[in-house]
Image (spheres, grey):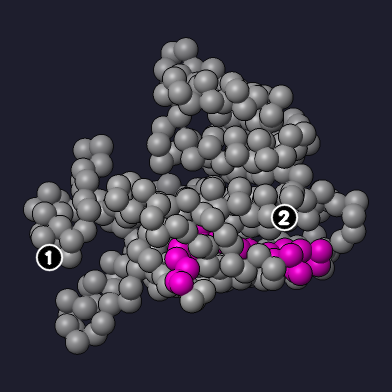
Amino acid sequence: MSDKFKKVVVALGGNALQEVGAPPTAEAQLKTVNKTCGYLADISCGGYEMAIVHGNGPQVGRIILSQEVAQRIDPDLPAMPFDVCGAMSQGYIGYQIQQSMRDALRNRNRNIPVVTILTQVVVDENDPAFKDPTKPIGPFYSEEEAMKLMAEKGYTMKEDAGRGWRRLVPSPSPKRITEIDSVKRLWNTTIVITAGGGGVPVVENMDGSLRGVAAVIDKDLAAEKLAEDMATDFLLILTEVDKVAINFNKPNQRELSHITVAEAIRHMNEGHFAPGSMLPKILAAIKFARRFPGKKAIITSLYKAVEALEGQAGTMITMA
């Protein structure tokens, strides 16, 4: 790679890892990841240096559930703590993307190494998010099961839109990617999969050592932090829709092709973007556009990724 290549951080939405209706198995996920990496390889072939950030919400939830089930079967078998489960999800999702990207690039006669970095992301121990858990993880429970988990394990549980009860964990803001120097050293030669699931959240002790905490960092905000650190030309946030819309799913729905930061903030304050869905993507895009006037944050679907980078699809958010 050389200076002629533009730099992009790609944040993968959940549909890039699992298709709706597909079984939650590693085999089914790998099939979806294989398709996803075809589109990502096309980005690389289009002349972009890239790093990949992915989510892990369903995956880490299932890992935690399997730990709890195993402990019920054998009470002497210790369940792994939340941060370790997050690291486990980074490892296996990264492995699948890494393997699929290698094959997709090879099929396009593009010889670029792909590597996964198990990434820690520093958060503030006093972040207000720790007092107000909002991030749903894991399976749905009945009200009776939820009340029992709250009593026995001290979980925060909340009813989720009539679908059942889910565990909520804090979602603190990312402050520092601890492995960023390694990403910088690899960037010019390697496609790096990093900050998976937003990174394993850690706090820094007085002596400089790190300690994992039970939390989930939003992957779009972690991707924005990576894009800032790497001063990329683009922050590309991939989701299920081709464009951001206001009045979503209403008769007067309107898709947005290009909005300024000021317009994005106005739409956000008017309540157009749902928390836990489009809102964190908009927040990440606003932050990137503010940090780098003249550069572009783009929100679009996986299938429109290449066209969006060329200005032919998606929603672009810029400072002006």
Image position of 292 (left or right of 151):
right
- Marks 2/1: CA–CA distance: 44 Å
Residue ID for mark 2: 230
Q: Position of residue 285 (x, y in %)?
A: 60, 38
- Residue flagged by tag 2: what amino acid is it? Met
Q: Residue at x 36, y 49 (%)?
A: 129
Residues in magenta, as a range: 183-206
Q: Residue at x 65, y 31 (%)?
A: 317
Q: Are marks 2 and 1 in contact (CB under 8 Å)?
A: no
- Residue flagged by tag 1: what amino acid is it? Glu
Residue 180 drawn above or below residue 224: below
Residue lying at the far front in this picture: please name it. 206
In depth, the one of 130 and 133 nearer the eye is: 130
Within-10-Å neighbours for mark 2: few <14, some 14–19, many 20+: some
> Total marks drawn?
2
Q: Residue at x 21, y 38 (%)?
A: 162
Q: In what element is the residue under mark 2?
A: helix
Instruction: Answer whether residue 144 is visible to the viewer in this image.
Output: yes
